[in-house]
Amino acid sequence: MRISHFAVSFCALFLLVVSPVEGQSRRTTRVLRSRPPAMATQPTTASHTITGIEAWSIARTNGFEFRPHASGDEWTTYPYDGVQTVLKAERLHSLAGLFQTDTVTVARVVGGNMTVDRPSSGSRTVTFTMFGGGRLSSGWTVEDVRLRGGTWKKRAEGNDLSIEVEATAYANRPATVRVESITLRGPAGQPWSAAFEGRRTWTISGIEAWATAKNYGYEFHPVVEYDDEVLRNGVDGTSSEVVQRDRPCSRAAGLVGKAVPFATVVGGNMIANCSHWAGEARDWSDNDPTRDFRMFAGKALAPGWAVRDVTVTGGSWVERPAPGSGSLAFVYRLTLPRGRVQSVTGIVTRVVLEGPASASSWQDAFKGN
């Protein structure tokens, strides 16, 4: 059969119209099939490696401690911020046949770096605590700490960045140690400085803590231990004392008739004056040479606050506040020397409190209850 010229022309026109549509359909299908996969999950944490001096600079302003350890006749100057925190000691020496005591510098933390001064002979070893007194903010951990010099005694772990380092100096050279770098891991998007800002610590003297706490109702007083004793002059530790009802305590024969209290808290300091006699006979087996004192009692710290450390000199602990506890209350015991007329004093030298970084001051710890 012959195909007409009109039919041929119609078929050619139809193919020209249909072909682009089919091509477009195929191209569209290919584009859809090659769509990229869903975006990968973003990391939730990130690491930050910083120099030791950078970490020290931020940490000290948030209450972390940097100090050499004291022992024996040594003491560490306050504050423990590592700007110029010095370990001092008293040394006895002879001059022209006379003995005298000098104060010498043993070690120091200056600008966040540790130094042990040269001894006059032999060697001298000192332990340092760095980044102590607090923990990193929630969500932050320590991955690595690198030192230049010194020997490790305690490494950082988890959110506890505190480290202990031992350094030894010799007569011909001092010892210097520095924290070279610290690697921290925390929430992605936060600056590394946030690791030190969630919580902070305050290190204060005992007299400062007492002066504030008494104004908010905390109690400081000797403990009444016997039926013939009475507590007088209140319980705020300004001049809170225990006396014996029936007979006065006289510290020496020359003081008969001039009574002194058995025990007193004066200006926040504890003083034991006399032994408690069970009878008139002055037999040392018939007395109690110890006196107990209750301090920072009667109230808990404000919500969000905790005690990290309390240092007291002159006696021994009966009840000590646990680190992290919300109560600073404790009982401390002084013991009078047998056979000697002598007062014994106990002094709260240091209180370390931890609280919110947003707190206006450490006094807030005593205000909440």
Image (cartoon, helix red, strand yellow):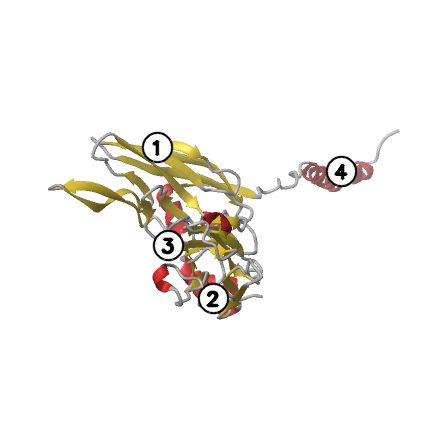
Q: Position of residue 273 (x, y in %)?
A: 42, 58
Could you say whether the residue bearing mark 1 is in a helix, strand or loop? loop
* Mark 2 vs mark 3, CA separation in Å: 22 Å
Among numbered discs 2 and 4, the one appearing first in the sequence = 4
Please name whichever residue, 296 or 239, is drawn nearer the observer in this view of the structure.
239
Name the residue carrying label 3: 341
Q: Quadrant of residue 153?
A: top left
Determine if residue 240 is in view: yes
Residues at circles 3 and 4 in contact by the CB criterion of under 8 Å: no
Please name whichever residue, 201 or 293, is drawn nearer the observer in this view of the structure.
293
Q: Position of residue 294 (x, y in %)?
A: 52, 58
Among numbered discs 2 and 3, the one appearing first in the sequence = 2
Looking at the figure, which quarter contains the N terminus?
A: top right
Name the residue carrying label 1: 150
* Mark 1 vs mark 2, CA separation in Å: 48 Å
Name the residue carrying label 2: 240
Could you say whether the residue bearing mark 4 is in a helix, strand or loop? helix
Could you say whether the residue bearing mark 2 is in a helix, strand or loop? strand
Mark 3 or 4: the one toward you = 3
Name the amino acid, label 3: Val
Q: In percent of the image, x 24 and y 35: which residue is there?
A: 174
Mark 2 or 4: the one toward you = 2
Determine if residue 134 is in view: no
For label 3, the crowd category at 10 Å Cα-Cα, with few meaning under 14, some 14 to 19 and many 20 or more, is some
Name the residue carrying label 4: 15
Looking at the figure, which quarter contains the C terminus?
A: bottom right
